[in-house]
Image (cartoon, rainbow, N blue to C red):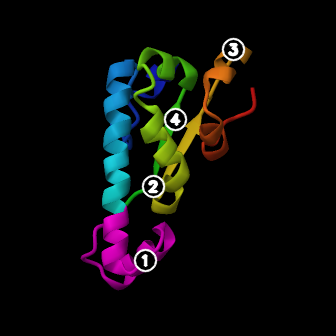
């Protein structure tokens, strides 16, 4: 479904459709989140907005774009990756908004898939109603 967005010029990375690559991308995104929190610490900021204010006063500071991650059929990704993404998505869901990373996910499209999704993930990841 997302292949129509493949040519958008401002994508952080190409559209990912293979579960194995999605696992790697989510792991790298967790690393980016941690890196951003390190920059915030050095700048004396607690979250994205505070760091942006710091950047206005310090033009040489690294500018950080917002990152929006859209995960379609998260329950299927969990199943095909043997749960390898649960830790990363859990951390991202709990902390990423504070550093300008936003997750949007369709956690499940069927009742059986919904039961496979973790309750903590459901609380921390924006999900459109089904």
Instruction: Tell me the mark number nearer the camera, choosing from 4 and 1.
Output: 1
Question: What element does badge 4 sit on?
Answer: strand
Question: Is residue 14 visible in the rendered structure shown here?
Answer: no
Helix, strand or loop at label 1? It is loop
**Which of label 1 and label 2 is nearer to you?**
1
Labelled disc at residue 45: 1
Sequence-earlier tag: 4 or 1: 1
Q: Which mark is residue 112?
A: 3
- Which span is picked out in magenta? 37-63
10 Å crowding of disc 1: few (<14), some (14-19), many (20+): some
**Residue at position x 62%, y 41% in the image:** 120
Going 39% across and 20% down the picture, which residue do you hit?
Answer: 19
Disc number for residue 66: 2
Q: Is residue 58 above or below residue 96?
A: below
Residue 70 tag number: 4
85 sits to left or right of 31: right
Q: Quadrant of residue 84?
A: top left
Residue at horizontal 43 percent and vertical 19 percent from the top: 82
Quadrant (top left/top right/bottom left/bottom right) for the C terminus: top right
Observer-nearest of 86 and 105: 86
Q: Nearer the viewer, mark 4 or mark 3?
A: 3
Circle nearer the N terminus (2, 3) = 2
């Amino acid at each position: 479904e997302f292949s129509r967005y493949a040519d958008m010029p401002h994508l952080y990375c190409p559209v990912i459709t293979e579960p194995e690559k999605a696992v790697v991308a989510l792991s790298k995104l967790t690393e980016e989140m941690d890196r951003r929190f390190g920059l915030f610490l050095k700048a004396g900021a607690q979250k994205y907005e505070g760091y942006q204010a710091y950047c206005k006063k310090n033009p040489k500071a690294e500018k950080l774009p917002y990152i929006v991650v859209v995960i379609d059929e998260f329950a299927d990704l969990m199943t095909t990756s043997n749960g390898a993404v649960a830790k990363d998505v859990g951390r991202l869901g709990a902390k990423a908004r504070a550093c300008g990373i936003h997750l949007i996910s369709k956690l499940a499209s069927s009742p059986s898939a919904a039961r496979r999704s973790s309750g903590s993930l459901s609380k921390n990841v924006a999900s459109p109603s089904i």
